[in-house]
Image (cartoon, coloured by chain):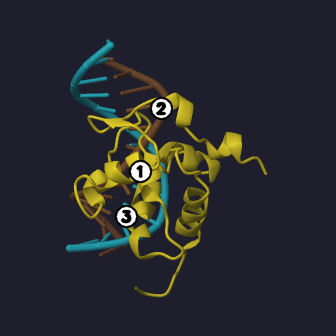
Chain colours: A yellow, B brown, C cyan
Amino acid sequence: MHPNPKPDFFEQVFQVVRLIPVGRISTYGAIARYLGSAQSARMVGWAMNASHSVHPPVPAHRVLNRNGCLSGKMHFAGPQAMQSRLEEEGVMVVDDQVQNFDRIFWDPSMELLL
DNA sequence: ACAATGACTGAAT
DNA sequence: AATTCAGCCATTG
């Protein structure tokens, strides 16, 4: 990879995602909003796409779209990798949709007041 | 430098 | 309630 011209945004995304507790999930939009770019949800997704080779690891499987569905599962090692990881953490997934979405939703701008 | 793309979202239909 | 439209902006061709 080339030197980081502006890795700030990605790095901030990684930081926040790493704070999502086990057994909880968040969304692209919520993270984007927390970072001040409410309309940059797509960039959060793009950051996740780049998060595989990042250290320390980023729990990208805990980031879903606003409907609570595993929109990014295709980008993991296997087609079921994302769901498996979530289920290992106690998150129930049915038909690519997380269950009890409202209950386990972790919103950084609400939970992570600074 | 311009056009297209995407792990999205909120508004409009 | 479900589907479509249009913005969003970093990255890539």
Disc assigned to residue A49: 3
Q: Please, which chain is the residue tagged with disc 1 on?
A: A
Of labels 1 and 3, the one closer to you: 1
Q: Is residue A83 visible?
A: yes
Which residue occupies the foreground of this view, A25 or A9? A25
Sequence order check: which comes first, mark 1 or mark 3?
Answer: 3
Dot label at residue A101: 2
Three-letter code, disc 1: Glu
Write down the quadrant of residue B12 in the picture: top left
Mark 3 and mark 2 on one chain: yes
Labels 2, 1: front one = 1
Tag 3 secondary structure = helix
Res A65 → quadrant: top left
Q: Amino acid at mark 2?
A: Phe
Q: Select label 3 or label 2 by which is in front.
A: 2
Considering only vertical position in the picture, is B2 above or below A114?
A: below
Please tell me which residue is depicted at 26% across the width and 34% down the height of the picture: A95
Identify the disc placed on residue A88. 1
Q: Element type at marker 1?
A: helix
Q: Residue at x 45, y 63 (%)?
A: A47
Callout 1: 10 Å neighbours few (<14), some, many (20+)? Answer: few
Q: Nearer the viewer, residue A15 or A4?
A: A15
State left or right for residue A110 relative to residue A4. right
